[in-house]
Amino acid sequence: MTDANGYHRASGSAGLRKAIDHATAPGRKGWHFLAEHKVTAPRMLIKGVAPYRGIMFLGGQSGAGKTFMACHMATSLGSGLPFFERRIAEIVGTAIVSKEGTDNIGNRLTADAQVRGLDIRKLPIAWRGDLPEIKTPEDVERVAAELLELQDKIKTRFGVRTGASVFDTIAANFHMTDENSNGEIAQVIAKLREFEIRTKGLVVPVHHYGKQDGAGLRGGSLWRGGADVVLSVLADRDERTGKVSARELALAKARDGMEGPIAPFELKPHDLGTDDDGEPFGSLVVIPGELGQSAVRSRRPKADARSVVTLREAVIEATSTSGQDIRIRADGPTVRAVEVQNVRSEFYHRYVTDEDDTKKASEARKKAFRRLLDKLPPDLATASQDGREWLWQVRP
């Protein structure tokens, strides 16, 4: 089934599989007999990290250094210098479709090249931030046409193919109304597969992690399911001060490789010149640490279940729109509370289920909400008053 935009409509893991299969790179068709199989090593761009083709998510928390890492990868691919001591199998060009910090991309690439002793005139890297938000088949066609035109230019100018296309970020480049919707995720994955097929190369979408990095790529679980590789840029971030420490690169998912830590890294400043006031300016650059080591990161409390997080979000939203000040018992405190029925509506809207059947999905939401009410997290409380059931946040 296709939607009004001409894309396969899908929800749940089965829908995602259909969407991905619909856009899978062409290969030898029909049955494959083991007796006729010739063993060959997987074709790679970066040994043990990046495949020759596919979808490789570059994910991490805000401020961890995802875009700096993408720039570091681009200079490695364009020069042949190792990426975190991993061999570059083929020198290729990189296209960066950026809508976040586009004006800074050039400085970041230049700084990375200078620190590595590279001549920027010889690096086959290009970027732009003025392409349309990718929503319709026409948008896919236009962006694909721009990427193919760039491929011709890079081939003519540098004599190499364009092997990687970076989309920084998923949220900025692809139209979505709900990152938690597995149906919408399946459609974005199908578009990414289309770019892979059209460019015959690696597609690298940059995506945020949630506040708790243990939850992985922000939104529905099918982001990970649709990826061939997930490269994680991790860090400890103090939300009060913005201080970031203990940065680390890890392979969180690999179809043909060992998953786990790659190495810690630092972001160090590099001067590029002086501004109109005579003060220095520059950028940060990735400095890899010792290969195979894991950063010494602070011990984090166990992440709450996604359903608990969803309930908190529903309480916050419902309270902001329909909350009331009520007194708990005659001698109790006054709290800002909201009726449970309003929280329930918000929770149903936000809760993600893998059920394809509408009736089963509805029942799954009801069961999840009932379980949460029976065992509320310690920062939420409930009470019945005047025939109405209320729910509120408990302040520390």
Image (spheres, rainbow, N blue to C red):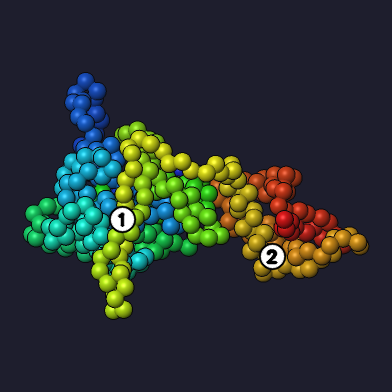
Q: What residue do we see at 64% from left, 53% from top? A: 311
Q: Nearer the viewer, residue 182 or 86?
A: 86
x, y percent for residue 245: 45, 51
Up-down relation of residue 212 to residue 138 (above or below): above
Q: Quadrant of residue 123?
A: bottom left
Q: Which mark is residue 319?
A: 2
Q: Nearer the viewer, residue 269 or 292?
A: 269
* Label 1: how many Cα within 10 Å (few below 14, some 14–19, many 20+): many
Does the CB distance between marks 1 and 2 fall below 8 Å? no
Q: What amino acid does circle 1 point to?
A: Val
Q: Which mark is residue 20?
A: none
Secondary structure category for the residue under label 1: strand
x, y percent for residue 118: 17, 55
Q: What amino acid does circle 2 point to?
A: Thr
Secondary structure category for the residue under label 2: helix
Up-down relation of residue 40 to residue 103 (above or below): above
Q: Nearer the viewer, residue 392 or 288?
A: 288
Compared across the picture, whether 214 is left or right of 378 comes to left
Q: What residue do we see at 46% from left, 41% from top? A: 296
The residue singled out by tag 1 in the image is 285
Q: What residue do we see at 59% from left, 41% from top? A: 302
* Label 2: how many Cα within 10 Å (few below 14, some 14–19, many 20+): many
Residue 135 in sight from this viewpoint: no
Residue 261 in sight from this viewpoint: yes
Report how far apart the C-alphas of labels 1 and 2 lie in the structure.
43 Å
Which quadrant of the rendered structure holds the C terminus?
bottom right
Q: What residue do we see at 20% from left, 26% from top? A: 39
